[in-house]
Image: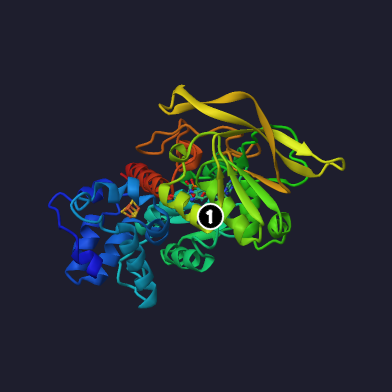
């Protein structure tokens, strides 16, 4: 309440304009400030079915909080934390604004819709459609829904228990989940033939980009496998890291998650190897500082070039060459250039490759992003929509939520036009 009291109650609520998913922080903070806690919860969850996860994971410093009018005058209002509080409070008091008769669901009239992929994009699309009377089935390849929230982001950042509660809010809308059900390349058209009136594809990016190609060999693992095995509670990640010097290649949020996980699994030392400087790292500033405070070593201005192997083929280390920053590249950042003759080997017993993900080869869109209208999710195939990472490339949870909502609106328009 004290944090909400600090809100300046701006007339035009610039924070709301800074939210990609239109969660409307201007409205929920105003309601909270006026002690209308139920109304505030309702605003969050009606606008963003994953309001809790977004409250925890959103890079708020470059979204809603960046636009907060208090910034520069006083400390920025902690919008993400207020949002998280409201969602957790709703669970604590058993108040679900989307079920239990408090929120009227229209009769299921608009038809059946299939959603492929149970990540943030698919979940938000499914929830929006179900709230508007559609009968929605989510087809999910893995044993549980949640996408990266379940099998990527480490549990110390977003717990399985927290995610389960947020998934209950989706289920309460009547969405059906078919898990352990991968949909193949011809799948979306097949589902249309089976009577689904529209299909939304939100399958994300699950194939690792390999920094040096070829076989990974002993001691080397991709971030996708490492984090997924960790989230599944498998012993392999601990076996890989425990008591060893671990190198993590990459400078984004995923690399930071891997480094922090390796520390928790008992690594002796964890080196984050990145070819540019600290301020150029794509990872958010708060994540970088957290990792630094926890003891991750940042090995900057070093370009990995391959692996050093011992006589038995085990990992001996990561080959590196030092870099310096030169003129600007296409991204507008200063370019790292190798320093001739500065090659060296970082001794390491394990290495995690975290340089990015791409679409899977054996999937709906083999090895390629899906091209879709960003405003509606429409693809070139009638009745098939797409959104989230499989359209944008690596993005954020809140962007995927926004894509799912936008596609749901377009699907509802299509279904309504067919009825009229
Ligand atoms: C380690 C990690 C940490 C991250 N941290 C953050 C963060 O802190 N904040 C933030 O905003 N963003 C973060 N992101 C990015 C964010 O998680 C993604 O942008 C978001 O999850 C994308 O949502 P999506 O629904 O498009 O895809 P996904 O979350 O990838 O979900 C896709 C789902 O589709 C399923 N699927 C795939 N193929 C098929 C198929 N053929 N049939 C059926 N189902 C299929 C998958 O199993 C998965 O459940 C992080 C990403 C990673 C990898
Ligand atoms: S969903 Fe994320 S970006 Fe939007 S208001 Fe909430 S914390 Fe900010």
Q: Residue furthest bottom?
A: 93
The spot of residue 373 in percent (x, y) is 39, 33
Q: How many marks?
A: 1
Residue under the image location 53 percent in, 65 percent down? 160
The residue under label 1 is: 153
Q: Is residue 286 left or right of residue 23?
A: right
Q: Quadrant of the C terminus?
A: top left
What element does badge 1 sit on? loop
Residue 98 seen? no
Residue 355 seen? yes
Q: Residue furthest left?
A: 11
Q: Residue furthest front?
A: 341
Q: Quadrant of the N terminus?
A: bottom left
**Eyeballing the image, is 261 above or below 388?**
below
The spot of residue 110 in percent (x, y) is 38, 52
- Ligand 1 has an atom within 8 Å of the beta carbon of the residue at disc 1: yes
**Eyeballing the image, is 350 above or below 41?**
above
Q: Is residue 389 left or right of residue 131?
A: right
Q: Is residue 333 left or right of residue 140?
A: left
Of residue 369 and residue 286, the one placed in the foreground of this image is 286
The spot of residue 56 in percent (x, y) is 41, 59
Residue under the image location 24 percent in, 50 percent down? 15
The spot of residue 12 in percent (x, y) is 15, 49
């Amino acid at each position: 309440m004290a944090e909400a009291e600090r809100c300046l109650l701006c007339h035009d609520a610039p924070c709301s304009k800074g939210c990609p998913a239109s969660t409307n922080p201007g409205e929920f903070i105003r309601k909270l400030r006026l002690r209308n806690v139920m109304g505030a919860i309702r605003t969050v969850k009606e606008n963003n079915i994953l309001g809790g996860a977004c409250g925890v994971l959103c890079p708020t410093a470059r979204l809603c909080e960046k636009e907060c009018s208090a910034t520069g005058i006083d400390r920025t209002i902690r919008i993400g934390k207020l949002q998280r509080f409201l969602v957790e409070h709703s669970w604590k008091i058993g108040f679900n604004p989307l079920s239990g008769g408090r929120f009227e669901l229209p009769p299921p009239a608009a038809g059946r819709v299939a959603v492929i992929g149970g990540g943030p994009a698919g979940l938000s699309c499914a929830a929006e459609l179900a709230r508007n009377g559609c009968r929605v089935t989510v087809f999910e390849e893995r044993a549980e829904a949640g996408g990266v929230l379940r099998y990527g982001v480490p549990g110390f950042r977003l717990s399985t228990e927290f995610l389960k509660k947020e998934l209950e809010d989706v289920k309460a809308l009547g969405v059906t989940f078919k898990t352990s059900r991968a949909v193949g390349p011809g799948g979306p058209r097949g589902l249309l033939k089976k009577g689904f009136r529209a299909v939304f594809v939100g399958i994300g990016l699950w194939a690792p980009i390999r920094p040096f190609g070829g076989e990974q060999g002993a001691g080397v693992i991709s971030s996708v496998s490492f984090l997924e095995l960790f989230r599944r509670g498998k012993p392999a990640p601990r076996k890989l890291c425990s008591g060893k010097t671990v190198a993590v290649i990459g400078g984004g949020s995923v690399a930071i998650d891997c480094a922090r996980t390796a520390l928790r699994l008992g690594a002796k030392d964890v080196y984050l190897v990145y070819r540019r400087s600290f301020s150029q790292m794509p990872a958010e500033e708060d994540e970088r500082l957290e990792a630094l405070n926890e003891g991750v070593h940042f090995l900057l201005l070093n370009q990995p070039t391959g692996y050093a192997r011992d006589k038995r083929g085990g990992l001996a280390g990561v080959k590196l060459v030092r870099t310096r920053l030169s003129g600007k590249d296409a991204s507008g950042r200063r370019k790292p250039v190798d320093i001739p003759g500065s090659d060296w080997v970082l001794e390491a017993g394990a290495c995690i490759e975290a340089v990015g993900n791409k679409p899977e080869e054996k999937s709906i869109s083999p090895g390629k992003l899906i091209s879709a209208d960003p405003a509606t999710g429409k693809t070139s195939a009638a009745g098939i929509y797409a959104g989230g990472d499989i359209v944008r490339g690596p993005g954020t949870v809140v962007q995927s939520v926004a894509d799912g909502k936008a596609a749901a609106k377009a699907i509802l328009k299509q279904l309504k036009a067919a009825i009229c």
